[in-house]
Amino acid sequence: MILDGKKVALDLRERLRETVLSYTEQGFRAPKLAILLVGNNPASETYVTNKIKACREVGIEAEKIALPADVTEQQVLEQIQRLNQDDSVDGFIVQLPLPEHISEPKILNAVSYRKDVDGLTPMSMGLTIQGQPALRSATPSGIQSLLAYYHIPTAGKHVVVIGRSNIVGKPMAIMLMQRPYLSLPNMTASSMGDATVTVCHSKTQGLTDICRTADILIVAAGSPKLVTKEMVRPGATVIDVGINRIEDSSSPKGYKLVGDVDFENVEPVAGAISPVPGGVGPMTIASLLQNTVQAYKQHIKQ
Amino acid sequence: MILDGKKVALDLRERLRETVLSYTEQGFRAPKLAILLVGNNPASETYVTNKIKACREVGIEAEKIALPADVTEQQVLEQIQRLNQDDSVDGFIVQLPLPEHISEPKILNAVSYRKDVDGLTPMSMGLTIQGQPALRSATPSGIQSLLAYYHIPTAGKHVVVIGRSNIVGKPMAIMLMQRPYLSLPNMTASSMGDATVTVCHSKTQGLTDICRTADILIVAAGSPKLVTKEMVRPGATVIDVGINRIEDSSSPKGYKLVGDVDFENVEPVAGAISPVPGGVGPMTIASLLQNTVQAYKQHIKQ
């Protein structure tokens, strides 16, 4: 079975569109997301354009704030303070990566966790790790929604996560090992947990044997075609978080996007598998929208 | 080999005493820890008394702030605000558990992470998960110091953690899977990581088989004698975080303290094992002192 992130994201976005409409029809203003973009990385430009388009489709107002590449760290921090305080903004994100002269942790630490719709601040992660209500990391949330949509249970299952990044591996592991928090607002789809979780990474010994014990294998290693069929127990679910550019002379762009999983090789043995592109990627954007709507609902309640 | 937490804690405390002395001899004031105790739970009283004694032995000034059991949540929050702002206090802890009418997350969320020497606030955990400098959870830090003292490596090893609590299981898993952060101040002993980590809990299936794959087994389940020799690979390191009271008519108190590991049964097969009492317990208090001295050093630098 192919886990069709594009379709599931569309479904989630349609539900968000209806939610937003139910509020604006009552006379509330529309939700608003701001995106801070520093410099002119072409890939970042594309991502931001896609996010703005996705926002508008569900009725979220989206504003791009572009700062030049030579802006100072202090100037970025001032923008963030302004956005933290601006009551017309429900959530905002800082598009990564930042130019090298700007400290990423320093910038993220300054974002108010109430508006942290990427779920990347230490406070959001800390609330998540403690099972408190929080805007949760967008990519792991998207993966939970994908699993939920296809009714793939996690309770009592062995989940192996390859990768220990701040944005995927570590929060994913935490969210899947926890007790489900069904009572949290807007968390139905991302409330799955109760898994036994193993986190592997570049220092892991015996990776193949560990992966073969997984009921669900989540790969966020940033290494093209790392996972082959020898590493997958027949019938297991495989979630591919990787987005790698590899040379491809047959493509007009000169490259193509591949995941961390050797899809052609693994697909025949996997019980379910997410493709790249069209798997986790669209779910991440949908989670960003979901977090924005959640922040909006909290915000207008006050 | 017995991992003698009492001895290692004594050694760590002696080094802390020398550090404090090196500052006070230069004319700086002594570090100060405040302990907020709500109600009159006898076990809590004993813990607080022990912590105050331990502080004084290393030259840390310790103040107990006792509030009656019927204090309101608002009054506790006001105390916390006062302690957050009091420049003469380097760190403080709220002795748990709190009376039922007071929300533990609400109280912990109010503690400034700069003074959070128990390392239990969401912000401290979030900084820890992101590998940023932080006051780290006292019990997991103590376990890292214990492993470091006995030169038990974690890099590339398989660590199995039983238990997913906010104070032990989850932060322990995170700290052991991360890249070591040798550059952090005062973090030498707690800088070990690079392990492959599996977290098990009450919903885990096949616990025995998983435990048998562990090079290091850390048990924080709160279940007396849960771990027997069948669950331990010969030669593995076993860390017992449990503290359970069980009836014992031969003891004058009518009970004795046992861990989550059946010590007599497991000790012959384990390569190294921490006893209860005298293992992780003393290390937790030593970590609290270490965090207090670390907060102090940051504080007087400003």
Image (cartoon, coloured by chain):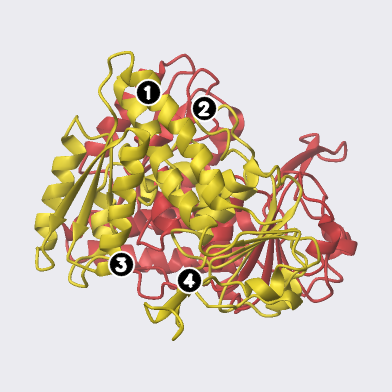
Chain colours: A yellow, B red
Query: Mark 3 belongs to which amino acid?
Result: Ala
What amino acid is at disc 4? Ala
- CA distance for labels 3 and 1: 32 Å
Q: Is residue B87 above or below residue B150?
A: above
User: Which label lies toward us, 2 or 1?
Assistant: 1
The residue indicated by pointer 3 is: A43
Q: In x, y percent, where is residue A243?
A: 47, 69
Q: Nearer the viewer, mark 3 or mark 4?
A: 3
Q: State the residue position of label 4.
A: B189
Task: Tell me which residue sits at (83%, 71%) in the image.
Answer: B233
* Residue beneath disc 1: A21
In three-dimensional space, the C-alpha distance between marks 2 and 3, rounded to whole angstroms, equals 50 Å
Up the image or down, A69 lies above or below B88; here it is: below
The percent coordinates of residue A298 (x first, y second) are: 36, 26
Q: CA distance from mark 4 to mark 2?
A: 31 Å
Callout 1: SS: helix
Residue under the image location 76 percent in, 44 percent down: B202
Q: Which residue is nearer to you in this view: B44 or A80?
A: A80
Q: Is residue A301 visible?
A: no
Residue found at x 41% / y 16%: B72
